[in-house]
Amino acid sequence: PYGMLYYGNWDLRLGLRLAYAFNHGTDPGRFRVFPSCEAAFNVPSASLRLFAGADGGYDADRYIDRKRWDPHYNAGWALPECTAKTVDAYAGVQGGIGKHFHYGLRGGYARYVHRPFASAMDWYAGTLFGPAPLPGIVYTTAAEGYVSLKLNWDSPWLDIGGGLDYRQLAEKGSGEALSPPMFSGSLRAVYNYRKRVYAGLWFEGETARATTMTGFYEPVEVKIPGWADLGVMLEYRLTPSWGLRFQAGNLLGSPLRKYSPYFAETGRSFTLGLTLIL
């Protein structure tokens, strides 16, 4: 249930989210009440919107979600469980300058129950040289502060979009949970000449991740290095629908960990192909 109030430049939403999870970790079921409210102030003359609020809810985790999160995911690591975001208190601003430039900034503090993390690991496998940690997933309580910045320039001949994310764990219930990267970001730019020739570049990257495994012979420090991906593309449109495209990725030669912190893609990549726009 919720209610909306509009007064002048103010928008106000007050409500609650009622939810029951049938699979919530080891619990047979859990009924929760989450906040769902937001206050916003609009300045139409400046294309500006200021907002603040609090939200929450259950995320019904599925096997396919885990595969999208990490293509190497194996159900033997941990069965999907229901994640509860007990509260996400946030504030931000979004707007634009002129016709082409748009921006958004949002920051907040969120608390979770049974949040999935890459694990470093909560079980071990023996080798000829002794015990060895294996990759996986662990669900645990967590709290984090975050800031997200999004920028975009859109014009008939040039498109630029990018973002920078900052995340800092304030609390986590398991030492095997691998902390998310403190900083991650991306930038993409595409220039077109008369919508016939397209040239672009992209950059993606994130900082190192680390944790300390406990519960075995002695604590073990685990660190996943950061990575950066720089690439370029060139496309020639033969017709409005068909094009010939060349793309080169990872020009910096960095071991990429876009899809999993435990499996690195090494070496540069080159792609040549046809594109079809329907």
Image (tube, rainbow, N blue to C red):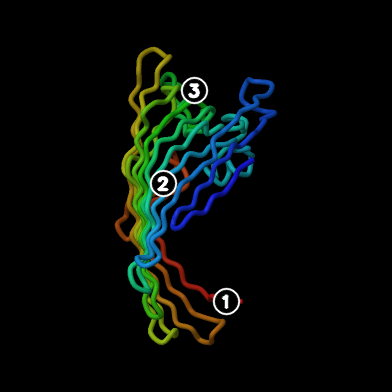
Front in this rendered view, residue 278 or 23: 23
Give the residue type that dot 2 points to: Arg
Secondary element type, mark 3:
loop
Query: Can you say whether 146 is above or below 98 in the image?
Result: above
Give the residue type that dot 3 points to: Asp
Q: Are marks 3 and 1 in contact (CB under 8 Å)?
A: no
Which numbered tag is attached to residue 260? none
Q: Is residue 2 left or right of residue 199?
A: right
Q: Residues within 10 Å of mark 2 (few under 14, many from 20)?
A: many
Q: Is residue 161 visible?
A: no
Query: Can you say whether 257 is above or below 99 in the image?
Result: above
Cα separation between marks 2 and 1? 29 Å
Among the two numbered marks 3 and 1 on one chain, the one whose residue lies closer to the N terminus: 3
Cα separation between marks 3 and 2? 21 Å
Give the image quarter of residue 195.
bottom left
Q: Quadrant of the C terminus?
A: bottom right
Q: Position of residue 100 (x, y in %)?
A: 37, 72
Query: Can you say whether 252 is above or below 234 in the image?
Result: above
Q: Is residue 61 visible?
A: yes
Secondary element type, mark 1:
strand
Query: Among all residues in the image, which is located at the extreme top?
Result: 217
- Which residue is at 67% across, 30% downward? 20
Q: Is residue 220 left or right of residue 238?
A: left
- Which residue is at 41% across, 58% downward? 42
Give the residue type that dot 1 points to: Leu
Residue beneath disc 2: 257
Query: Can you say whether 255 is above or below 215 in the image?
Result: below
Residue beneath disc 3: 122
Which numbered tag is attached to residue 276? 1
